[in-house]
Image (cartoon, grey):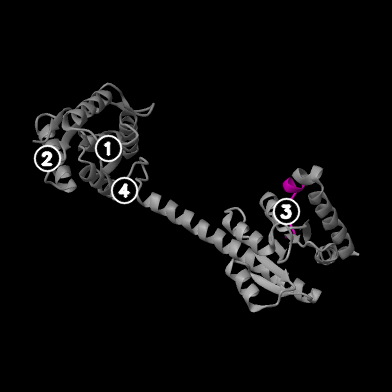
Amino acid sequence: MRRGRLNQEYLEVAMNIETTSGEGAALTERPSSPVILVADDEPVNLSLIKRRLEWEAYAVLTAHDGDEAVEKAQKFLPDLIILDVMMPIMDGLQACRKLKDIPATREIPIIFLSALDDIETKVSGLMLGANDYISKPFRVEELIARVRVAIRLKREREELRRSAEEAQLRAEAAREMSMSDSLTGLRNRYGLQRALQREYAETRRYHRPLSCLMIDIDYFKEINDTCGHAAGDTALMQTARILVDAVRGSDVVCRYGGDEFLVLTPETNLEGVAALGEKIRLTAASRLFGDGERVFELTLSIGAAELLPDESSHEMLARADTALYNAKQAGRNRIASAE
């Protein structure tokens, strides 16, 4: 009784799919059982195969020639296609070739049915990408067994693909986390190195400027000692926000370490990056940091440098760091440019 009810349900689904007015509903309510498209120009064969597959609880679509099979395959994306080789308008081999050229249907497995039992036809079908070839006349049990194998292999491939995609997403997320500072969300030094390699290569290739800012919070240790480490963390996050808000989308902002930040600015000369540094310095000097219970002022010291024609990117960073040291030595809360 249970199999009879299942057959009736899938027969109704198949009838809905075959009815033009019901195609949209069938697509939105796709059966959980595999959908098989059968193409054969002989009505008796088509009816026999359709009934036997429905008895196995498959949902079945039918087509009477290769052109109709290609059209329905694109529309319904079945789990398996069974193609008769000899059909009018477009034969099974031509239909297979076309289906394998269409990205949406390329991965759908295909089984050929044919009265042609010569090796050349079989080889041609398999070379076109078909998964199996059954010669007519055939035993229904053999067809069902091969259908089961094709469906199982398709589902295993899909599961492997899903697993690979999930693994790739996890790897990308882990890589992104490894390049980010957990407190501020900015790139860390590893993330900076990746960006620096890319921007340095682009700069040399297209002969365009590249500059950077080395930024340090003045007297940050005193903030931690006086207001506590939680307030210091808040100040770091607020400083990071000032930097992100001040730069362009193409610039790279990094927490270089401790209370030190670095901004990498492609296509910007020393004058431009110094102006950006001054804007950042003034923004920090004009606001309060901390939270509602404990607020305080802080200032930034900044060193600016532009990549020279014959130096490496790390030499540019070293000169920016020297400029930062000079800014601190000169009294802090100022910007100094590298020579």
Name the residue tied to disc 3: 68
SS assignment at label 2 = helix
SS assignment at label 3 = helix
Write down the region rendered in magenta: 26-34
The numbered disc on residue 224 is 1
SS assignment at label 1 = helix
Placement of 287 over or under 191, stated as above or below: above
Of circles 4 and 1, the one toward us is 4
Of circles 4 and 3, the one toward us is 3
Sequence-first tag of 1 and 3: 3
Under mark 4, the amino acid is: Gly
Under mark 2, the amino acid is: Thr
Q: Relative to 81, is 240 on the left or the right?
A: left
Q: Position of residue 123 (x, y in %)?
A: 61, 74
Magenta stretch prevailing secondary structure: loop
Q: Relative to 254, is 272 on the left or the right?
A: left
Residue at coordinates 30% horizontally, 36% vertically from top-left? 251
- Are dots 4 and 1 in contact, CB under 8 Å? no
Crowd tier of the residue under label 1, counting other residues whose Cα lies within 10 Å: few below 14, some 14–19, many 20 or above: some
Distance CA(mark 1)–CA(mark 3) = 75 Å
Under mark 3, the amino acid is: Glu
Distance CA(mark 4)–CA(mark 3) = 53 Å
Crowd tier of the residue under label 3, counting other residues whose Cα lies within 10 Å: few below 14, some 14–19, many 20 or above: some
In which quadrant of the rendered image does the C terminus lie? top left
